[in-house]
Image (spheres, rainbow, N blue to C red):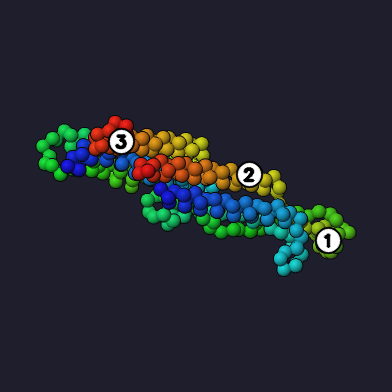
Amino acid sequence: MISALDVSTSALVAQRTRLNTISSNIANMSTLRNEKGENKPYQPKHVIFQADENMIGDNGTAGVKVEKIETEESEPLYRYQPDHPLAIQDGKWKGYVAYPNINLTEQMVDALEATRAYEANVGVMEITKGISRQTLSLIA
Amino acid sequence: MWSSLLGQSSINALTQTLQFTEKRHELISSNVANMDTPNYKTRDLDVDRFQNSLRQAIEEPAKTRTRSPGERSPGEITALDEVSDQWQKTRDVSKQVLFHDGHDISLEEQVTEAAKNQTMHFTAVALLKAQFRTMQMAITENVNV
């Protein structure tokens, strides 16, 4: 019974990781330089979930874990801003500035989904607690 | 004395039910936990199957009344063991909407199943409590237990 709580907790952790990633995507919507200071726009990140079969045992119960966080390799968004200090100096995109290609709507929907999933797992945890309490009431 | 006292009542059948609902609840939790996991398929235990094998286990020894004392009583039911390893086969994937990332979880359905399962658990606990209270009454010769 207690293992059901562990399963739900693993999902809470995973969904929180996902929400953190979304936050970082939205926060870096206009970030033009990467962490090394190079002129590379921020690339959005995606969390990949995986069923964690070995969490409890082989009875079919599976938790969740974050398998990996992938970085999207998308074309940046080019905006024509010739007076911008980071404007591209030569080539096809001369006078353009490369911005991160982050779709805000997509990110918000994803954030909403993560929040709802988090809530659903909290709901299941309440049920688990109710069942355990009821079982324990047999001896009390 | 104890085996006859505990074995003849429904206590052991109820215990099996409790174990079943706990197992099933764990599976439902993992279904909800893996709501966003690609390629995860819904898992469940078959309630009807469990109840059928529970009924069989109760009825069979009752029919063959010749069993010697101490032999398998309705209490020693193995209904759970027969069902619990069947968790994968109980679900027909095609009944569900299969999403693009390969999972088939309907949250509403899982929450309903969790609520049903919880009710089943509560019922079993309430019945067990009633059994124990009756026993207590007999032991203490007091109706107001």
Residue A71 drawn above or below residue B78? below
Mark 1 = which residue?
A87
Chain of the residue that carries numbered disc 1 in the rendered image: A
Disc 3 crowd rating (10 Å Cα; few below 14, some 14-19, many 20+) is some
Element at label 2: helix
Q: Are marks 1 and 3 on the same chain?
A: no
Residue B10: name its quadrant.
top left
Element at label 1: loop
* Foreground tag (2 vs 1): 2
Disc 1 crowd rating (10 Å Cα; few below 14, some 14-19, many 20+) is some
Mark 2 = which residue?
A112
| Residue type at tag 2 | Leu
Chain of the residue that carries numbered disc 2 in the rendered image: A
Q: Where is residue A102 shown, x and y percent of the image?
A: 71, 52
Mark 3 = which residue?
B133
Residue B59 drawn above or below residue A24? above
Q: Where is residue A111 shown, x and y percent of the image?
A: 64, 47
Q: Where is residue A86 shown, x and y percent of the image?
A: 82, 62
| Residue type at tag 1 | Ala
Disc 2 crowd rating (10 Å Cα; few below 14, some 14-19, many 20+) is few
